[in-house]
Image (spheres, grey):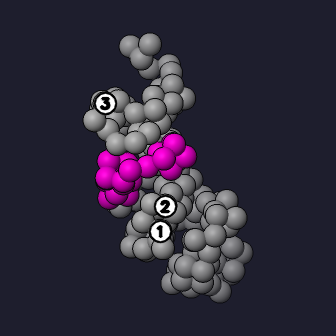
Amino acid sequence: MDRYKERRVLSLDELKNEVFGQHWHDETWHEVLRLISGMIDPKFINEIIEYLLNLKPDESTNPINLFLAADCLSEVRNRKEITCSSQLLSKLQEFARTYELGSDPSSKVIDRIAFTWKDNPNILVWLKSCLSFDSPSFVPEAAITAIAQHYKNSSGIL
């Protein structure tokens, strides 16, 4: 990280390709990649998130690239420069609607959405819409858990 931020020995392309590109699929690296995201300029994180959005994980039922992108976004303090936030949100919401998920993947995708966009008033509305009986797999259960965790102090929730 010092090579990028302080000494500028590492270019943005190298950061994307050699750091994020080589380690995005390895969940043991995700905490490090999140921390890097919180330390560098948001416009560079925007490019990294766009890079992650365009990756194709091996398994269509585990969007690890989208989870990492949401985790990186959650570390950004000033999100005004993150222009791909709504695209990431749409992809995660589509994934939750489209795939027949088990309990753990449903919980992960719904929790990422609720945590990362907790300040967006439309997310609570979306979570409530996930409670319908025609939602696939464990999505309603994951949505109620996310509402209980992230919106417990909102008026009218109980």
Q: Amino acid at mark 3?
A: Phe
- State the residue position of label 1: 59
Given this view, does label 3 or label 2 mark the residue nearer the observer? Answer: 3
Q: Is residue 6 left or right of residue 120?
A: right
Where is 89 relative to 134, above or below? below
Q: Which residue is mark 3?
A: 133
Q: Start and end of the magenta stretch?
A: 87-107
From mark 1 to mark 3, how far is it between C-alphas?
27 Å
- Give, as a three-letter code, the residue at label 1: Glu
Q: CA distance from mark 2 to mark 1?
A: 6 Å
Q: Quadrant of the C terminus?
A: top left
Image quadrant where residue 24 sits? bottom right
- Point 46% across, 32% down: residue: 141
Q: Disc 2 residue type?
A: Asn
Q: Can residue 105 be found in the magenta stretch?
A: yes
Mark with earlier residue (3, 2):
2
Question: Which residue is pictured at 42% across the width and 17% down the height?
Answer: 157
Badge 1: residue crowd in 10 Å (few <14, some 14–19, many ≥20): few
The reply to whether dot 2 and dot 1 touch (C-beta < 8 Å) is yes
Provide residue 156's location: percent of width, then percent of height: 38, 13
Q: Quadrant of residue 4?
A: bottom right
Instruction: Tell me if residue 134 comes above or below residue 49 in the rendering.
Output: above
For the residue carrying disc 3, how many other residues have a C-alpha within 10 Å: few (<14), some (14-19), or many (20+)? few
Q: Which residue is mark 2?
A: 62
- SS under mark 1: loop
20 in relation to 102, above or below = below
Disc 2 element: loop
Which residue sits at x=31%, y=30%?
133
Residue 149, disc? none
- Nearest the viewer among 154 and 4 is 154
- Between residues 139 and 157, which one lies in front from this camera angle? 139
Residue 51 location, x and y as percent?
Answer: 43, 74
